[in-house]
Image (tube, rainbow, N blue to C red):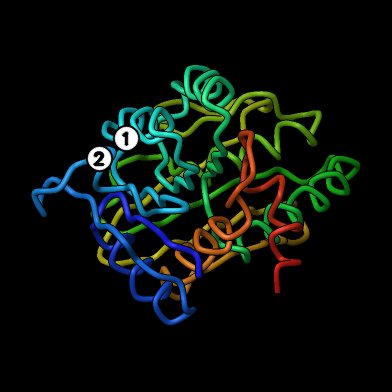
Amino acid sequence: MLKIAIIGYGQMGKLVEKLASQNKFEIVAKIDPLLGTEINDQTVAKADVCIEFSTPTAAPENLKKLIKLGKNVVTGTTGWHEDLPVIEKLVESNATGLIYGSNFSIGMNLFFSLIDSAAKLMNKAKDYDLYGLEMHHNKKQDSPSGTAKVLSDIILQNIDRKNISQFEKLDRKIKANEFHFASIRSGDIPGLHLIGFDAAEDTIELKHNAKNRNGLALGAIKAAEWINQKTGIYNFKDIYEQILEID
C-alpha cells in the first residue's frame, strides 16, 4: 500500500486525503502550519511519496526540505516555477523524483492535447482571431492561472500570427500579434478554461469546465503512484499518458 504524506491541509489537501483513502492508499502524515506540524525527518519518515498543495510562497521551501530528506514529491501548487532551476538541481543531487504541473486533471491534460491539435489546424485559417478565458474561485491566489499560461504557450507555439500573450486589462486597441487571455475570480468556481477562434462568419470555442476539484486530486494521487521509487523531474503534462496506463 502506497504511503502518502500531505503537505498543505487546505481544500486540496483534504480532498487528497479523502480520495486517497477511498483508493486504498494510506495517509501517514498531514503537514500544515495551522495543524502545528512541519516538514522534518520524523513527520515524513513513513511516507513513500509526498503530495504538496500549498501556496506559491510556501512551495519552494517545502519542496527543498522534502527533496533534501530524500522524499519523492508531487506538487500541484502553481506560481513558483521561477524557482524550478534550483529545484531541478536539488532533485538531481539528491536522486529523488518530482512531478510538477499547472493542472493535474487528466481531463485538462487531454484538453491541452486537443488545443495543440486545434491550434496547428487553425494556424492555416488566417481569418480567425483568437482569445482565451479562465474562471476560478475567489480564494485562488494567482492570476492568470498556471493552466492559462500553459494554454497560452500552446497557442503561441502553434499560431504564427500570435507571438505575445496579454493577460492584463488593455486600455488601447489590441495588436494583431497579441493573444488576449482574460481571468475572472468569483464565488466557488472550480475552474473553467476556454479557447476561442472568431471570424466574421462564425465562432469556434473549445472549453474545459471542471465540475469539481476531484480530478485535480485524483491526478495527483495517480502521479504519486507513478513517481514512487523513480528518480528525475517531470512535468505532469508530458507523462500523463503514461500515468493513464496505471489502470
Mark 2: amino acid: Ile
- Residue 177 in picture, x, y percent from top left: 68, 25
What kind of element bears circle 2? Answer: loop
Callout 1: few (<14), some (14-19), or many (20+) C-alpha neighbours within 10 Å?
Answer: some
Look at discs 1 and 2 and give the one toward the viewer. 2
From the viewer's side, name the closer residue of 123 and 201.
123
Q: Is residue 173 found left or right of 187 in the rendered image?
A: right
What label does residue 186 carry, if any?
none
Residue at screen point 56% across, 43% down: 99
What label does residue 62 carry, if any?
1
From the viewer's side, name the closer residue of 82 and 141.
82
Callout 2: few (<14), some (14-19), or many (20+) C-alpha neighbours within 10 Å?
Answer: many
Tell me the residue that label 2 is attached to. Answer: 39
Q: In the rendered image of this protein, does residue 143 appear above or below residue 36?
A: above
Q: Are marks 1 and 2 in contact (CB under 8 Å)?
A: yes
- Residue 93 in picture, x, y percent from top left: 55, 19
Dot 1 or dot 2, earlier in sequence:
2
CA distance separating discs 1 and 2: 7 Å
Question: Residue 61 is drawn in which quadrant?
Answer: top left
